Amino acid sequence: MKGFPKDFLWGGATAANQYEGGWNEGGKGINTSDVMTAGSHTVPRRVTYKNINTGETGSLTGFGPNMKLPKDCIPAVIDGEYYPSHIATDFYHHYKEDIAYMGEMGFKTFRLSMNWARIFPNGDDKEPNENGLIFYAAVFDECAKYGIEPLVTLSHYETPINLTIKYGGWSNRKCIDFFETYAKTVFKYYEGKVKYWLTFNEINCMEFAPFVAGGLSDPSPQNKAQAAHNQFIASAKAVKAAHEINESIKVGQMLAYMPLYAYTCDPNDQLMVMEAAQTSLFYADVQTGGHYPAYRLKKYEREGIVLNTEPEDFELLEKYSADFLSFSCYGSTTITTHDDVSKTSGNLMMGIKNPYLATNAWGWATDPACLRIALNTLYDRYHKPLWIVENGIGWEDKKEADGSVHDTYRIDYLRKNIASMRDAINVDGVDLMGYTMWGCIDLVSAGTGEMKKRYGFVYVDRDDQGNGTLERSKKDSFYWYKNVIATHGENLD
Ligand code: BG6
C-alpha cells in the first residue's frame, strides 16, 4: 500500500476562541465568542447580554439559527458567568511549549486562527494593535524553528463584538471593508512567514448559527443571505489582496462538509439528501466555484430575498475564487423523510441514527468512508486542491496517575480515517494537500463549551469549571501520530 506524497502537509488544527485564552491581554478587544457561556451535551451554550438603558442582563441560546438579541440589548460579559474562551487552554502563554510538542510529532503544518479582535480590537479601528501583531509574529517564528508551515484562519467563530453592536454584524456591507483592511494588514505584516490562509471557518454555518458565524444580532433570512454574500465578497477581496502582495500566498475556503446519506431508497429521501447537500455546497459553489448556483437564486426568488450588491461583486467572485478548498469532516449524517426513527446529534446539524455506524458519547457518528466520499465529491465538483483541516474524535479521556492517557479509541478512529484519505489519493487520484487533525492539543469544545470533550494528542489539565493546572502531557496517540508522519502515512499500526 502506497503512503502519502512526501510533501503532504501533516499537522493539527486549533482555533483562537477555543485554545488561545488571554482574552483581555495585550490590548485585545472582546469578540462574539467571549460572551458565550459553557454548556454541555444537553444544556446549550448561551450568549449573555445587557440592556443599554436599564443595565438588566439576560442570555439566549447561542448556537442556533434564531439567536436574536432583544430590543436595546447588546452582547456583554456579565459578572458571575463562566466563559470558557477567556482562558481556554492558554496557548497565549504556552505557545512555545505547545509548538515544541508539535515539532516533536513532526508536524509539517499547524492550523490556528488569528483573533481578529487581537489585531483590530473593535473591528473598525484605523490602526492595528501592535501588541497583537507581535504576538502572532512570535508564534510564527516559533513554528519556523521546527519547519512548521502555519495555516491561518482569519475568522474562526469570532467577530469583534463592536461590529455586532454598531453594525448588526456581517449583514452590513461595511464589514467587507473592515475585513479587507484586516486581511491586507496581516498579509503584509506576515509576508514570508505565512503562506496559507483561510478566510471564514465553516462559512456555511451561517445557515445554522448566524451569531457564531457572522455576529448577527438579527438572523432574519434576508440578513443571513446578505451576511453570506458579504463574506463571499470579503473572501474574494482577500484572495485579490493576497495575490497582489505576493503571488505565492494562497487563500483557501473553509467549509463544514459531512456526506449525507438517505436512510431509505424512498425517492423522497433521495430528494431530501439532494436539497440538504445544496445547503452546504452552495457556499463552495460561490466561494470556490466562483458563481451563484441557479438553485440558490431560485430559493431567494421564492423567499423574496433581494441581495444588496455592487456592480463589481459578481466579477470579483469569479475572478478571485478560493485558491483551494479546505473542509472539516468528522463523520456522515443520515436523514430521512420518515419519522419513525431515532435521532442523534451531529455537528450543528441533526441527523438520525445510522444502524451501520458507531457513535461517540455526544452522538457523533464515526464513518471513515465519509472522508473518501467527501474528497471525491468535492474534487469532482471543483477540480481544485483540497485540504482536510478538521477531523477527529471528541472523547472523555482518563489521565492516569503517571500522566499517561491510553486513547486507543482515538488511534483507532484516526487510523481508519487516514486510510480512507490514502485511498482517495492513491485509488481515486484526488489532489489532497494536507490533513490537520482537529484539536491537536486539548481545547474547549465549540458546540458545548466543555473541556471533557477532548480531541488532542496532548492532554491539558483543565476541567469544565475552569479548574486545573493547564499542565500538558502526551497521550498514546501522540506517539502513534508521530510514527504516521515519520512513515509518510505508510505505517498506521
Ligand atoms: C468544527 C468547528 O465544527 O467542529 C470547531 O470548526 C469545533 O471549532 C469542531 O471545535 C468540533 O466540534 P465540537 O463541538 O466538538 O468542539
Image: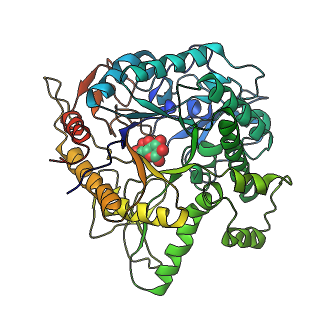
Residue 469 or residue 10, whichever sits in front: 10
Quarter assignment of residue 164:
top right
Residue 431 in percent (x, y) is at: 43, 55
Q: Is residue 387 left or right of residue 47?
A: left
Residue at 46% from the left image edge and 35% from the top image edge:
38
- The tally of labels here is 0
Which residue occupies 48% across, 34% down?
A: 15
- Residue 306 vertical placement versus 25 (above, below): below
When the figure is inspected, residue 329 is found, relative to residue 273, above or below; the finding is above
User: Height in image: 2 above or below 183?
Assistant: below
User: Residue 432: percent from the left, percent from the top?
Assistant: 41, 52
How is the structure coloured here?
rainbow
Query: Residue 396 occupies which quadrant of the picture?
Result: top left
Evaluate whether residue 151 shows in this view: yes
Ligand 1, by image quadrant, is top left
Residue at horizontal 75 percent and vertical 69 percent from the top: 303
Along the line of sight, which residue is nearer the eye, 365 or 419? 419
Residue at the far right: name it.
311
Picture coordinates of residue 200, whole percent (x, y):
59, 43
Foreground residue, 17 or 95? Answer: 95
